Image: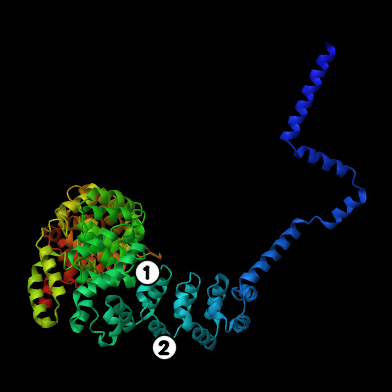
Amino acid sequence: MAAKKQDDGNTKKRKRLDTKTRESPSNSKTSNLTASKKHKPHSIAKDTKQQKPILTGRERRLQAKELADARKKKRKRHYTLEQELARLWEKMRRHEIAKEDRAKLVTEAVQKMKGKIPEIAGSHISSRVLQTCVKHCSQSERDAVFEELSPHFLNLAYNAYAVHLVKKMLDNASKKQLAGFISTLHGHVAPLLRHMVGSVVVEHAYELANAAQKQELLLELYSTELQLFKDLVSLKESRLLDVMSKLKLQKGSVLRHMTSVIQPILEKGIVDHSILHRVLLEYFSIADKSSVTDIIQQLSSPLIVRMIGTRDGAKIGTLCVKYGNAKERKKIIKGLKGHVDKTAYHQYGCMVLVCIFSVVDDTKLITKVIIRELQSVLKELVLDKNGRRPLLQLLRPNSSRYFSPDDLATLSLSIPSLSLKDQSEAGSLTETTKVSLGENESEEDMAVDEVNKDKISVDDSDLAESGKKDPLVRRQELLIKSGLADSLLDVCIESVGELLRSNFGKEILYEVATGGSDGIMRPTLDDKINSLHNAVASLAAMPKPADSQEEHVLENFHSSRTIRKLILDCPNFASTLWEKAFKGKSELWAHGHSCKIVSAFLESPDTKVQKLVGKELQPLIDRGILKNPKLKEQANQ
């Protein structure tokens, strides 16, 4: 029995071993290899180690660099030249280098690049070297580089690195060279404007061009016919309507061409350039209602922030605000979030904020997005030439004292196809144009006019150019309810001396101290306005400094004139100032700039003020220190 059990156990062991060998055949191979390694002689193992030496980290890096250089040499034709130019560039671009040494390095670099400039201009290394060379080389070398590159300018304009070189070449180009470059753009302006990189070149050329060259670039975007007959148009016909009437162009074909140019550019979001802004303004002047509303809908987004940095761009921004519906206005305001302070400081962008304050009825949204952001930098805005304009629009709207004729013209801009006033005159204008065009008017243009007539007759209640809300109510909500007026008064009281002496801050202080036009800040903020009057009077009551660099407010050029205006226009301030600063001291201040302030008390239209100062100032008139205001009036008459 025991022998049988032993045989069974042996057979089971054999079966297990067989299954293991079937499952892992590699085990036997590895065991054989290890066995063979054990029996290798010691000398052969040493030889293998000598064949593969261990490299240090530095040696590995050098080896990898050599391999990379070898690959680049195969891939790049001018790789060695670029490396040489990079070494020269590192020396020539230093600030401490002498002019003579830099000139030698630049000449050496230009000589090495000669004949190969168009090929290497697209490289990120070579383009920078070329820019430095163009900046510091002699005029003859610069002309040689320009001549070599001139046949390749269009190709380089599409390159992300070469575009900077092209701009540098244009900055240093002569009038003849610039004219030659603009002529090479002929027929390629629209395709370049559709390209993110190429549009930068067109814009740069447009900024450097004179009036005739600008018109040459613009005409190409108006119509295909104008590409052929550009010489028939003079500078007098600067507007598209004038060009169309002179050349008898069909309105329908011009609109189609301009739409085909503008739409792809807007779809790609390339809206930063002033040449496009000019084209859009001209498009608005001839386009029908549906075309204009489509463009306004596309622009009513954060895109508008990128447009309002130019004069024409700001005009487009104001037109979008004026003629956009409630949804579009909301998008424009929300798009300004985070950019309000920069927009307010900008020469043209601030006019878009002025337009928003004048037109948009959603005062809660304006308060939340715009006014809250303005309140955080209120003092800086008050002292800034452009930053004060939105504030002045709320205090005294559309005042020619604070806004130039160009600014007021921007605010009164209109789109003919959407403007209610222009639409009422459209009938008579179309009749006269038909007579002038005669037989040249096509059936297609007549069909367009019929469609426009139908669109004009539609109810235009949604196109409220100046908003539906009463302007005074809108101003109260933006100025008083939002807390902006309260913040303005705090700034004026805290920085009364600085504002009075500044060229721009004095205007805000004057408007706040008088309560704004239509007495908008009264009677809600009477207490704070009186506190401001007291602050100005306390500053004026300070004794005249003996040896001080800062002038007294009554003698400073800006502050003396502001105080004089306040005396004439605000009787409450005049009485406060007299009681605190001038009573018993009028003779001391009856000389210099302060003399005008003392005379203002006599010229005040308020009888109470005249009675208050009459007893003390009459002796000064008798003695000839002050002039009698009545005699002044008679002399003027």
Q: Nearer the viewer, mark 2 or mark 1?
A: 1
Residue 99 rendering spot, x and y as whole percentages: 59, 81
In this view, 514 is above or below 621: above
Q: In this orientation, does residue 5 appear?
A: yes
SS under mark 2:
helix
Q: Nearer the viewer, residue 54 or 27?
A: 27
Q: Count neighbours of disc 2 (C-alpha within 10 A) and say few if under 14, some if 14 to 19, many if 20 or more.
A: few
Mark 1 lies on residue: 194
Secondary structure at badge 1 equals: loop
Looking at the picture, how far across and down is residue 439, in whole percent? Answer: 11, 82
Q: On the rendered image, what quadrant is the C terminus found in?
A: bottom left
- Specify the amino acid type for callout 2: Lys
Q: Gap between marks 2 and 1, in whole Å?
A: 27 Å
Which residue is most to the top?
A: 1
Disc 1 marks a residue whose amino acid type is Arg
The residue singled out by tag 2 in the image is: 176
